Amino acid sequence: MEKHITLPLTPELAKTLKAGDTVYLTGTIYTSRDAGHKRMCEALARGEELPFDPENTTIYYVGPTPAKPGQVIGSAGPTTSGRMDAYAPTMLSVGARGMIGKGARLPEVVEAMKKYSGVYFGAIGGAGALLAKCIKSCELIAYEDLGAEALRKLYVEEMPVFVIIDCEGNDLYKMGRAEYLADKK
Amino acid sequence: MREISVHKITEVIERMCIEANTQLPGDVKCAIETCRACEDGSIAKGVLDKIIENYNIAGQENVPICQDTGMACVFLEIGQDVHFIDGNLADAVDEGVRRGYTNGYLRKSVVADPIRRGNTGDNTPAMLYTEIVPGDQVKITVGPKGFGSENMSQLRMFKPSAGLQGIKDFILEVVEAAGPNPCPPIVVGVGVGGTFDKAALLAKKAIMRPLDQRNPDPFYADLEAEMLEKVNALGIGPQGFGGKTTAIALNIETMATHIAGMPCAVNINCHVTRHKTEVL
């Protein structure tokens, strides 16, 4: 199904999204990848606060190219989510609910998603120029020394994503492939 | 003896890094568009349409096709009658990468140390390969390589008894294990033979070869076609959402090897397969 939703991603909203849905996201999201997640989880372990309030947020796994003069942001497609698997259950446990990336997730991430009503969205990998068009503002909020990996707050409009794994654990990667192979027989 | 200033090398590498990252080559576009025409699934078709829209935007606006503008793989085939002047060749290549990635607003994705990390800030060093060939020309190939796909690549040292079937099974095993991670549809580069290191280099060279050029040996050209079909029968599909198009091309490069071995490397590349070649 095609759905147009406005963030933040509350548990109620998360539960309406099903694996295989095409979703257009509008609202505020935060960017982070390997190094940013490592720092955030280390901060949480020390009992410190995160650079943003994680409640009902959606985190985009992206390291954009530098903006050219006149651009809000450079090309900004998703990176491989599996590298954030070590940190995702911790982030979900403090209230972060949506994740945008690409590629497979570990069973422990899916279990945490079921527990905390998390949703894993896929953006089209390698479509960085196209996805950048949906990003209307970009503000660096922490870890500036990490360059492309710094934490950024983005405002997106009608950002096209797919629900890959929903909060019941249904997985588009498994469903889509099984459906194709069944049709071919 | 033909003299070439290394400043010329810097200038050409700078321009090639920018062009390679913003303009998808015609052979890759053609392969993607051919696959789009054959897809039937609505999600698969939709994904391929977005991929085409993306490289068109990048080309028109001169922005990177993908935010992972990669490590700069640079291949130099240097005629033995060339004499480089005005400086050190490797430094000149790195300077070209530094300027290209800085002036072209490309992402700096290189860390100075594999374990201790630390971004070098300018995407250097280049992954530089030089080869001495006859003549007085220099053939330069620049192929920015993203790591979503690089991370899904594998190498195995087979016993010769594994034979052709062993290689076929391995290619499918690597693509299956990669699944949705390397941003399918992918390009599969296979290197067979040589030593441990040469097999990996052959696989890298395979993804630098234009996708519409088959291996000149009919045995391997047939194997490329057969394995592309088998990879696509896996059903992984565009972005892993299921469909006909798991790979848009499969290139195989081979060379002699030892009586005791059969090394095989499979280098995976994404649909943003960037390769650009120029001759000086």
Image (cartoon, coloured by chain):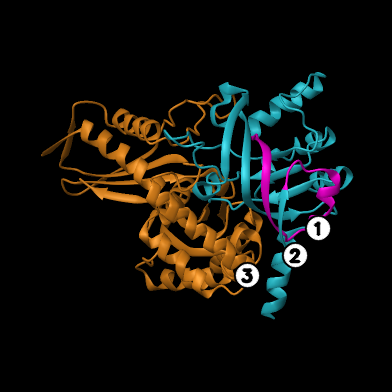
Chain colours: A cyan, B orange
Query: Quadrant where the N terminus of chain B lies?
Result: top left
Answer with left or right where residue A87 lies relative to residue B72: right
Q: Secondary structure at mark 1?
A: loop
The amino acid type of the residue labelled 1 equals Asn
Find residue B193 and report its horizontal and vertical position in percent. Answer: 45, 56
Magenta-drawn stretch contains A9:
yes
Q: Identify the mark at residue A175; answer none if there is no mark.
A: 2
Q: Which residue is mark 3?
A: B42
Q: Nearer the viewer, residue A165 or B75?
A: A165
The amino acid type of the residue labelled 2 equals Met
Instruction: Tell me the chain of label 2.
Output: A
Q: Secondary structure at mark 3?
A: helix
The amino acid type of the residue labelled 3 equals Ser
Residue in the picture at 48% in, 60% down: B52
Residue in the picture at 16% in, 48% down: B135
Q: Label 1, label 2: how many angstroms apart (C-alpha)?
A: 8 Å
